Image: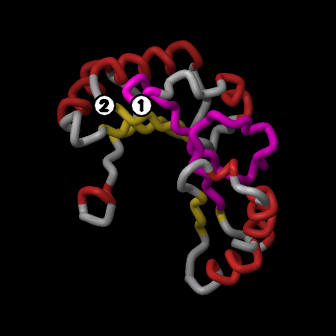
């Protein structure tokens, strides 16, 4: 889709925040131009990315939400640790948790790297892990993270 077509569609809605997500947005041709166009019109821009592609060229005005893949995803080695240097205090990290192994992976990651981000999200795969169980682990460990549920699945819009 052409950038002009995307901008035309975006302008139809009374919003000031745009989240770019779906697949891996950084693989999309001209995503950098889309960032510039949205910024030019004063949109607050969120980018949801898997952290497997360098964030070096993502502008600081883009809020990065980086999904650190856990062992349960089978892609835990895909995250580029050097991307941590491109995160700003406005950015966020997200861990999708399937079980206690994923949880411990995420806890160890946070202890090892001590990322300086706005917040950390722990999101259970509800088909595999009861959110209450994850919440209990987080409380027991005094974890500074947010329990995030996939609302689109809960309300039937997945």
- Residue identified by numbered label 2: 98
Note whether 146 is above or below 98 in the view shown.
below
- Residue identified by numbered label 1: 73
Note whether 27 is above or below 114 in the view shown.
below
Colour setup of the view: secondary structure
Q: Circle 1 — which element?
A: helix
Residue at the image point whose x is 30% and y is 26% from the top: 138
Looking at the image, which is closer to me, 47 or 75? 75
Magenta stretch holds residue 31: no
Note whether 69 is above or below 14 in the view shown.
above
Q: Position of residue 143 (x, y in %)?
A: 37, 25
Q: Position of residue 111 (x, y in %)?
A: 50, 15
Residue at the image point whose x is 68% and y is 75% from the top: 6
Note whether 153 is above or below 41 in the view shown.
above
Q: Circle 2 — which element?
A: loop
| Quarter of the image where one finds residue 135 | top left
Q: Are marks 2 and 1 in contact (CB under 8 Å)?
A: yes
Magenta residue span:
45-74
Question: In the drawing, what numbered circle is on residue 41?
Answer: none
Crowd class of label 1 (few under 14; some 14 to 19; many from 20; radius 10 Å):
few
Q: Position of residue 97 (x, y in %)?
A: 35, 32
């Amino acid at each position: 889709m052409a950038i002009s077509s995307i901008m035309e569609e975006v302008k139809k809605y009374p919003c000031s925040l745009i989240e770019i997500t779906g697949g891996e947005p950084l693989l999309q041709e001209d995503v950098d131009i889309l960032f510039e166009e949205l910024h030019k019109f004063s949109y607050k821009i969120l980018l949801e990315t898997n952290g497997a592609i360098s964030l070096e060229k993502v502008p600081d005005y883009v809020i990065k939400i980086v999904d650190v893949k856990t062992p349960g995803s089978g892609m835990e080695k895909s995250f580029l640790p050097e991307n941590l240097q491109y995160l700003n205090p406005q950015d966020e990290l997200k861990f999708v948790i399937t079980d206690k192994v994923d949880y411990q992976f995420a806890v160890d990651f946070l202890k090892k790297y001590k990322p300086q981000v706005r917040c950390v999200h722990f999101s259970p795969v509800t088909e595999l892990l009861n959110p209450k169980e994850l919440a209990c682990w987080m409380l027991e460990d005094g974890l500074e993270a947010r329990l995030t549920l996939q609302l689109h699945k809960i309300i039937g819009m997945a």
